[in-house]
Image (cartoon, rainbow, N blue to C red):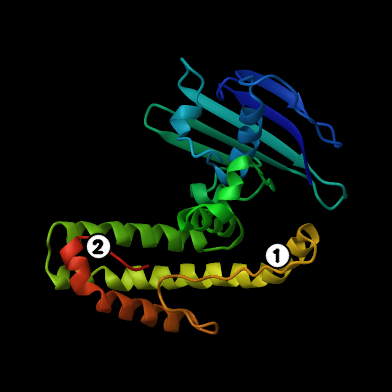
Amino acid sequence: MYLSELSVRHFRNLKNQELEVPREGVALIGDNAQGKSNFLEAIYYLETLRSFRGARDSQMVAFGEEVFRVVGKTEGKSDQYHGTRVAAAFEKKGKKKKVSVNGANPDRLTDGLGHFSAVIFSPSDVDLVSGGPADRRRFLDIVLALNEPGYVKSLSSYKKNLARRNAALKSGQSSSVVSAWDPGLTKAGAEIMIGRRGWIESRSSAFDGYYRRISGGRRARMSYRPNVSLESDADIEASRESFREALEDSRDREARRGITLVG
């Protein structure tokens, strides 16, 4: 599969463009601030519906405009693949984001994820190794959201339950009020941990192989270590119970600090 067409309207400094991309690909050459990274950002947006640079949607609307729109079409090298057309738009007024796939509007925005296959590699990606754990969690969440059915739902549920639990802790609510959010938090949290662990385990061997090729034969190991005890063979229920126990053990400290400390 390769990108064959790209259309942009009021996306950053790209203004209005209709481009045909040759199967061989393209090389972007130009001075700084001419739009090379913006071009890549527009393509990546069609897969993830977000900026790889962490920008808000409103920041990607061209100066003086109210809406941006990006449309891309992919084609395949075989007769079995008939191509995919993805269109994404954002409107400042009302902060509305829209997406369509082959002319159809999905019931949920998350159903529009992953119809493009785009991989971005930028200087900031070294943060996956040298940066903090938040960078690695963000990377895993994006990859799993694009490839694992149900992961976005689990992640959304986790964030909602965590926000409500933290609000209860911050306002000094009773233990019973705080713990009311524990079932939803532990269920979604266990699903997330199992998903992350499975992805890492399935690619650990390949990671070691790639590292040996570029390091003169040295070995490397990739593993998942959440701050909740997670046995290598733990299933969803076992992981959920470990999460529940960790919350129980930290309940007094959380009450003093006003925030959830595990998960």
Q: Nearer the viewer, residue 189 or 8?
A: 189
- Of pointers 2 and 1, the one earlier in the residue sequence: 2
Residue lying at 15% horizontally and 72% vertically, measured from the top left:
175
Category of crowding for the residue at label 1, using alpha-carbon neighbours closer than 10 angstroms: few (below 14), some (14–19), many (at least 20): some
Q: Secondary structure at mark 2?
A: helix
Say above or below: 217 vs 14: below
29 versus 41 height, above or below: above
- Look at label 2 and name its amino acid: Arg
Q: Horizontal and vertical percent for residue 105?
A: 55, 43
User: What residue is rendered at 54% in x and 84% in y?
Assistant: 233
Q: Which mark is residue 207?
A: 1
Q: Quadrant of the C terminus?
A: bottom left
Are the residues flagged by discs 2 and 1 in contact, CB closer than 8 Å? Answer: no
Q: Which residue is mark 2?
A: 165
Of circles 2 and 1, the one toward us is 1
**Location of residue 234 in the rendering, given as x and y in whole percent from the top left corner:** 50, 83
Q: Position of residue 126 (x, y in %)?
A: 60, 49
> Marks 2 and 1, Cα distance to the nearest angstrom?
37 Å
The quarter of the picture where residue 88 lies is top right
Q: Residue at x 70, y 30 (%)?
A: 6
> Residue 59: horizontal and vertical position, in percent?
46, 28
Task: Please give left or right for residue 16 compared with residue 251 in the image.
Answer: right
Name the kind of residue labelled 1 in the image: Phe
Q: Along the horizontal axis of the image, is 30 left or right of 109?
A: right
